[in-house]
Amino acid sequence: MYDLIIVGAGTAGLTAAIYGQRAGKHVLLLEEGIYGGQIINSPEIENYPGISKVSGYQFAMNLYEQAASFGAKLETGKVIGLQLLDGKKQVKTQEAVYECGAVILATGAKKRRLGLDREDALIGRGISYCAACDGAFYKGKTVAVVGGGNTALEDADYLSNACDRVYLLHRREAFRGDDSLLQRVKKRENVTILTSTVVEGLLGGEQLEQLQIKNTVTGERKTLELNGLFVAIGQQPENEAFRDLLALDKEGYVIASEDCKTNVPWIFAAGDCRTKPLRQLTTAAADGAVAALAACEYLNA
Amino acid sequence: MAVLHVTKDEFETEVLQAKKPVLVDFFADWCGPCQMVAPLVEQLAAETESVGVVKVNIDEEPELAQQYKVTSIPTFMLFKNGEAVKTEIGALPKAELQKLIAE
């Protein structure tokens, strides 16, 4: 039995593990994929206090090794539920059931999906959620970016350097992103901006070949021939498995304030998975510390 | 044991004509998830006799990446008798890598 089980081994979870172990608790991290969290996709971090420059990979490795050096254990497993059964606090994965004294959810957030048929099957086969990661594969090709915020505008700008043609598709008329960024994108000759446009279908065989799009004002439908689609429509949390126990907001984030406490006394929430105004590396790390010490306080009471 | 890095020229003999199945890790030096998963790929190679494990640097071998339609890395492809029979995209935990080569 563990004192503390942390669900998710990103920045918040690994930081919580460091604080938990240092407070004398026996900590298990459960991670469904590879540890490190979203930051491993960042080529360079320049806004973490005290570190002027570090790659996301190096940051994640350092953080993991630090947590491991204090004795935190890491196991692979997708958590499918939490429950209180005969007074026992349990964490269920697809393979096992773990018992513990308290839980910290640090499940993070992932890139929001369009929610279209075949979307998952075409990831890495024409669909990408990271222009900086995958853009280089589309040199000289035709791509589309979906979204209306800064990420979509930045992606369109970045991709226009390497790609032959970039379509920027946005469901509304006005962009949410910065005007200066929009003006820069508008100056790119190989970028075509289509507003009031939604993606209705993904067509192709093994690879994405065409998009079915619709103009929401005129109702006109057409297909776009392309090689790649970059989806930049924000993030979504992954807390559905905990909905029966925990209060979530309408977007699915765990309702918890700066103290990281949820509506269930033995469950805490840290990092991007909880309701908060700013989702950054520093705030994830800060949450990890706060949640771990709150959990220790609960365990010691 | 370091995993063999194969070039386009070596791909034929090391992968396509190999007697046993070969897992190919398409990667790049600048890719964080590739770096995260690299030690696991090394471990897998050291522990596995029945399946070969090689790496292809997509910056050095763009033609291979193009030929096998790699558009996101890391991409793991299992080759059997000269054909790609399974593909997984993204940094996988070790258990998933083991599942990919199991059979």
Image (spheres, coloured by chain):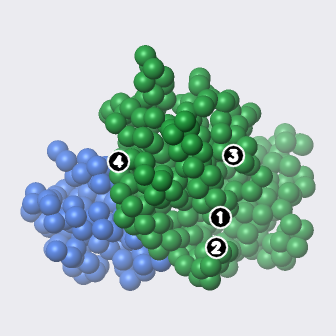
Dividing the picture into quarters, in which one does residue B61 lie? bottom left
Give amino acid for label 2: Tyr
- Parent chain of label 4: A
Drawn side of residue B90 relative to residue A56, left or right? left
Kindly report the distance in space between the C-alpha atoms of the residues bearing marks 2 and 4: 27 Å
Palette colour of chain A: green
Q: Is residue B101 above or below residue A163?
A: above
Residue, disc 2? A48
Query: Which residue occupies 17% across, 44% down?
Result: B103
Q: Single out the mark in the foreground, 2 or 3.
A: 3
Q: Residues within 10 Å of mark 4 (few under 14, many from 20)?
A: few
- Parent chain of label 3: A
Q: Earlier in the sequence, mark 3 or mark 1?
A: 3
Mark 1 secondary-structure assignment: helix
Mark 3 secondary-structure assignment: loop
Q: Earlier in the sequence, mark 2 or mark 3?
A: 2
Q: Position of residue A224 (x, y in %)?
A: 68, 54
Kindly report the distance in space between the C-alpha atoms of the residues bearing marks 1 and 2: 6 Å
Q: Nearer the viewer, residue A238 or B65?
A: A238
Q: Position of residue A266 (x, y in %)?
A: 55, 33
Q: Residues within 10 Å of mark 1 (few under 14, many from 20)?
A: some
Residue, disc 1? A282
